[in-house]
Image: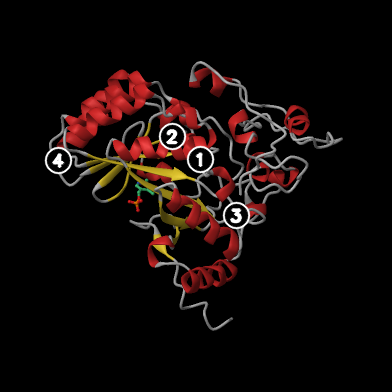
Amino acid sequence: MNFTNKFYQSPSYEHWQQEMSDAVSDVATLFAMLELPTPSHAYAPSKFPLRVPKAFVAKMQPRNPRDPLLLQVLPDAAERALVDGYTHDPLAENAHNPIKGLLHKYRSRVLLTLTGACAVHCRYCFRQHFDYIENLPNKSQMRTIIDYITADKSIDEVLFSGGDPLSISNQKLANWLDEISSIPHIRTVRLHTRLPAVLPNRIDDNLLEILHNFTKKGRNLVIVLHINHANEICDNLREKCTKLRQIGATLLNQTVLLKGINDNADTLAALSHTLFSAQILPYYLHILDKVAGAAHFDVPIAQAVAIYWQLLARLSGYLVPKLVQELPNQPYKTPVDIHRYRESQ
Ligand SMILES: *Cc1c(COP(=O)(O)O)cnc(C)c1O
């Protein structure tokens, strides 16, 4: 799983912000790093362009045009296809947006979109069309959000999302955590983030200290990583996970089932084992959200279920993520009815 003779070595940076802004943004550069021939007609969308940190490129296999990490970030002309059922707001989130920056869709937890920024543009991102400009909380909206959570005692968990919540500064994160830890009925803060996988250096000492200050107050900290393939787990990420565990964070992972990337039991079993060895537990395996531009990643549900039965048959229970689907207007992530599809095998 580890490529010791990697062609491409990521440069070293002083700050993660530098590393984030030094992301690769054109296909020619990316292909040169991977020793791949420059394509004659690279698809280069202006709206959701190529964006990938060099630390993630360093985990790709050189000279492999089908590398599972490369395919997650490489714009494909197939994105332009208009496919029935694929929309700009597949989860009908706009309907659950009572105040800017806050989604209250499920009971007992709210999700905050703290930023539109992310270090990486995954081609299947379900918030790639989300109206962030409209939805980013400024200082006074932060007050409104905190008041909303304070007033609703049925909420016990606050999710930080985005964009990627770890693309905001440590200072801003510390402010949010301070505000939230002043609300007595909030037990848990949960970060949903892909930054540790694509830019492990984001977990710097100052961030660890800020997160530790939060857990020291007796509150729970959950970090849900977004990792789709075992090759994304490098030594640097493992070290960061150890540090996060030491400050009391619970580490979970969610994966999107993606055609051509992880749509077989071998790949998913290897992912679960590799996650566990990095102290991360598999949480969700998501059926792809039907977001416009991502139809070419779709794995038909019957096939997803067939793969899932194989996982059940070969992995320890705690290594099997829950297979779920996000259906608009459902008050939870819906478990896929795996018995319905069993006959067809
Ligand atoms: C996924 C999601 C959550 C969290 O759901 P869990 O099942 O608790 O992981 C909360 N709010 C929104 C809007 C979500 O999309």
Q: CA distance from mark 2 to mark 3?
A: 21 Å
Q: Position of residue 19 (x, y in %)?
A: 55, 22
- Quarter the C terminus occupies: bottom right
Numbered badge on residue 185? 4
- The residue nearer to you, when weighing 239 against 210, is 239
User: Viewed as shown, does residue 296 lie left or right of 187?
Assistant: right
Q: Residues within 10 Å of mark 2 (few under 14, many from 20)?
A: many
- Sequence-wise, the earlier of marks 2 and 3 is 2
Q: Position of residue 243 (x, y in %)?
A: 36, 35
Q: Position of residue 325 (x, y in %)?
A: 46, 59
Q: Residues within 10 Å of mark 4 (few under 14, many from 20)?
A: some
Residue at numbered disc 2: 162
Residue at numbered disc 3: 258
Residue extending furthest toward the left: 184
Residue extending furthest toward the bottom: 343
- Sequence-wise, the earlier of marks 4 and 3 is 4
Q: The residue under label 4 is which amino acid type?
A: His
Q: The residue under label 1 is which amino acid type?
A: Arg
Task: Name above or below for residue 118 compared with residue 279.
Answer: above
Q: Are marks 1 and 2 in contact (CB under 8 Å)?
A: yes
Q: Are marks 4 and 2 in contact (CB under 8 Å)?
A: no
Q: The residue under label 2 is which amino acid type?
A: Gly
Q: Which of the 4 quarters of the picture holds residue 20? A: top right
Q: Are marks 1 and 4 in contact (CB under 8 Å)?
A: no
Task: Tell whether circle 4 marks a residue whose Cβ is less than 8 angstroms from ligand 1.
Answer: no
Q: How many marks?
A: 4
Residue at numbered disc 1: 127
Q: Which of the 4 quarters of the picture holds residue 234? A: top right
- The residue nearer to you, when weighing 279 against 175, is 279
Q: Position of residue 42 (x, y in %)?
A: 79, 35
Q: CA distance from mark 4 to mark 3?
A: 38 Å
Which residue is rendered at x = 40% and y = 27% of the image?
136
